[in-house]
Amino acid sequence: MFRKDPFGRAWVLISPERGLVASDFGSVLPLPQRSPLSPGNERQTGPEIAAIRPSSTAPDSPEWRMRVIEHPSALVEPRPFRVEGDALFRQAASSGYQEVIVEHPDARMTLDSMPRSHLVDVLRLYRERLALLAAKPGIRHVQITRNVGRAAGALFEHPHAQVLAVPVGSRWVEEEVEAARSHAREHSRCLFCDVIERELAVRERVITHNEAFVAIAPFAAKTPFETWILPRDHDSAFTGVASNTLPLLAELLQTVVRALNDALDHPPYNLLVHTLPAAGDRTFHWHIEVLPRLTQQAGFDWGSGFYVNPTPPEDAARFLREALALREVQE
Ligand SMILES: [Zn+2]
Ligand SMILES: [Zn+2]
């Protein structure tokens, strides 16, 4: 169930049924050909919600290019969101949507190794699922998460993403929205657009960029090699991204992941799409955060609420730029 923290903005999912068991559904099946997400194993997962497949093929049969399935251990389910309780103790049955997007039939495929055109189709499917779930009644927060590697909490080794849509706000996105609102009140400009402009002028923390997107190591990176990818044109939601810029996003994503893989030897990472449910809002600017899982959060961080990051973002950006330059020389 959802419980509202009376001392802050967080909603907590209290989920005893989840127990203490890690969600590593795929870890008992280490061989890629035995991945429960591979073609031929469709019955091992929940029924297909949507798929990119030839129209002559039936749902839950092989021959698909991408599939959308129910999350195997969903923490939320579609049902009305009814908050009970008083100002101190507010709670509601956990409601919302949780899906898994199987991005490629080949279990060994990765974000950086898949053909560019296939990744463009994956991004289009992200946009489609987010738009569809954002339109459901009462949804306040939608999110795409891509966990890679066991240390990053990946459900499967097979390339996949998770889609979440819930009737409560995300603490992190709301904090960013609040910062953007207060900046807009003071300067009548988008905070993110201003940061992008400054970063592109200074270049110190820019990792790479193209006509439509820029990848930076944020000024106050919370973790080593934290990387943000932002659209250079303002928009509040991923659902607003134009089809003709998706190839540019795919290009930048692959470049960033290759740089991290080269520089840090294929680190586990979390990729999060931070977005509002709908486009057209001036007070937020959607972006992707890539967070390599390199350090354990230590007691100081937990105890104080400060993040301790041993890698200055300027060093991280330079290191990643060098990795990309080296790759260019070798290719
Ligand atoms: Zn903006
Ligand atoms: Zn963010």
Image: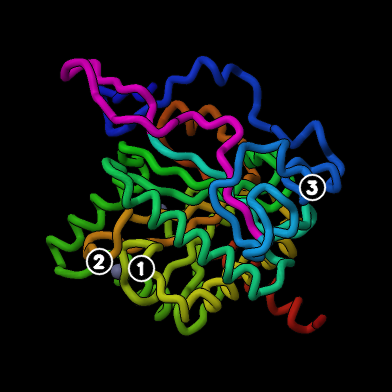
Q: Residues within 10 Å of mark 3 (few under 14, many from 20)?
A: some
Q: Residue at (47%, 84%) from the top-left corner?
A: 211
Left or right of 306, for residue 122: right
> Would you say residue 67 sits in the magenta stretch?
yes
Is any atom of residue 276 visible in this view? yes
Work out which residue is located at the far front of the displayed protein and give it.
56
Q: Indicate which disc, 1 or 3, sits on the residue closer to the N terminus.
A: 3
Q: Which residue is mark 2?
A: 280
Of 120 and 188, the residue lying toward us: 120
Asked if disc 1 and disc 2 are in contact, CB closer than 8 Å, the reply is yes
Mark 2 residue type? Gly
**The label number, if any, that marks residue 240 in the structure image:** 1
Q: Nearer the viewer, residue 39 or 22?
A: 39
At horizontal 40% and vertical 43% (from top left) the residue drawn is: 165
Q: Is residue 58 magenta?
A: no
**Horizontal placement of 166 versus 114: left or right?**
left
Q: Please tell me whether mark 1 sits on a helix, a strand or a loop.
A: helix
Q: CA distance from mark 1 to mark 3?
A: 35 Å
In three-dimensional space, the C-alpha distance between marks 3 and 2, rounded to whole angstroms, equals 42 Å
Magenta stretch, residue numbers = 66-95
